[in-house]
Amino acid sequence: MSPIVTAYIIYLLISIGLTYWVARTLHQNGRIFLVDAFHQNEPLADSVNHLLVVGFYLINVGYIALALKTGAHPQNVQEIIELLSEKLGVVLLVLGGMHFFNLTVFSKMRKKALTHHWMPPVQPTGQIPPPIPQP
Amino acid sequence: MKTLWLIYDDTCGLCSQVKAWLQDQPTLIELKFLPIRSEQLNQLFPNLNREELNRAVTVVDDRGGVYRGSHAWIMCLYALKNHRIWAYRFARPTWQPKVEAFCEWLAIRRHALSEQFHLPPENDAAEEGRMK
């Protein structure tokens, strides 16, 4: 097996392995955010969680596949490691970016749902007799 | 809190546009709208001072609590499902003075701004009467 093919195989194994790990983390730990965001509707939260993970895989594995090809010609182990380091570095940054983006979205959804239970932000400045209920 | 009444100037184009937008939004609390000179307002809230109602927009809740100016707009946002978070932002102590000043500035210039931006009021007949 040529050095470049070795590099490709290691790159794919590590990248896809890392993607699987991050997706699992989001799936398990993001669930509680979604349950809150959907007012304790667990079936809905699980459904959305699963759909989001599918999207996450599509985008990340897609990027990994696109970024695989290189013009470099590593001749020895050092050059293989350097090539892998570069490529994996970008993959990790992309995964990290997606991860924080997901967290931001989960957090906003949950916060919006929580506001449904909050009291008004201001107090009335005046008081009059309450309106008589209309028929 | 289940209902809020927004008492607004229907001869003002700007107020009418905002009211139309509010009417279209999904709400967490029922938002009802009463023009200042309406019969319904006299029946529901005979105790409110008409001059004060003309000076600044007013919201009344179902316990009789009265909110004016920027607080009235904050309560309108509080009623909306998708914009409630903005009610809390505008109510922050650091934002409040500017928000209050801006609402007052708008209230004073509302008719002039409506004319400048060609915003049609709900109640055209009353508007013509005012301009004559």
Image: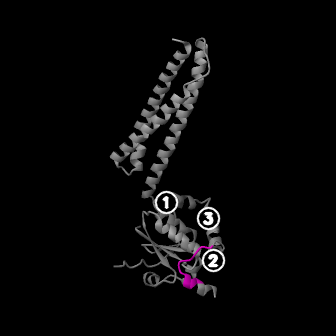
> In the picture provided, is B87 more to the left or to the right than A40?
right
Q: Which residue is mark 3?
A: B99
Local SS, label 3: helix
Chain letter for mark 2, please.
B
Give x and y (percent) for residue A125. 53, 72
Q: Which residue is mark 1?
A: B84
Is-magenta flag for residue B35?
Answer: no
User: Could you say which disc has been placed on residue B111 in the image?
Assistant: 2
Foreground residue among B105 and B67: B105
Closer to the chain start, of discs 1 and 3, is: 1
Segment colored magenta: B118-127
Give x and y (percent) for residue A123. 51, 67
Snapshot quadrant of residue B131: bottom right
Chain letter for mark 1, please.
B
Around disc 2, counting alpha carbons within 10 Å, would you say few (fewer than 14), some (14 to 19), or many (20 or more)? some
Please say if B106 is above or below A89: below
The structure's colour scheme is one colour
Chain letter for mark 3, please.
B
Q: Amino acid at mark 3?
A: Val
